[in-house]
Image (cartoon, rainbow, N blue to C red):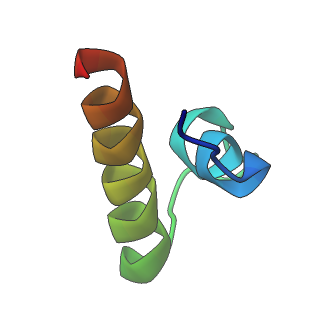
Amino acid sequence: MIYLDANIFIYAYFKAARQKLPQKIIWMKEEAKKIIQMVNDG
């Protein structure tokens, strides 16, 4: 069984209030989505 921290879901799917995000945050969101996709795929 795999346990994920809630921050992964927050970074992946939470929509920011401002449109222009720093590049580091965009990268973290993309990586979080990849982690969730890997878990879903098995």
At 66% from the left and 37% from the top, the residue drawn is: 15
Residue 6: percent from the left, percent from the top?
76, 47
Q: Nearer the viewer, residue 41 or 18?
A: 41
At 51% from the left and 66% from the top, the residue drawn is: 21
Q: Nearer the viewer, residue 29 or 15?
A: 29
**In the image, is 11 to the left or to the right of 10?**
left
Residue 16: percent from the left, percent from the top?
69, 47
Extreme residue toward the top, this view:
41
Q: Quadrant of the N terminus?
A: top right
Residue 36: percent from the left, percent from the top?
41, 34
Residue 4: percent from the left, percent from the top?
63, 47
Extreme residue toward the front, this view:
1
At 56% from the left and 50% from the top, the residue drawn is: 19
**In the image, is 1 to the left or to the right of 6?**
left
At 32% from the left and 52% from the top, the residue drawn is: 30
How many marks the image carries: the answer is 0
Q: Quadrant of the C terminus?
A: top left
Q: Is residue 14 above or below residue 37?
A: below
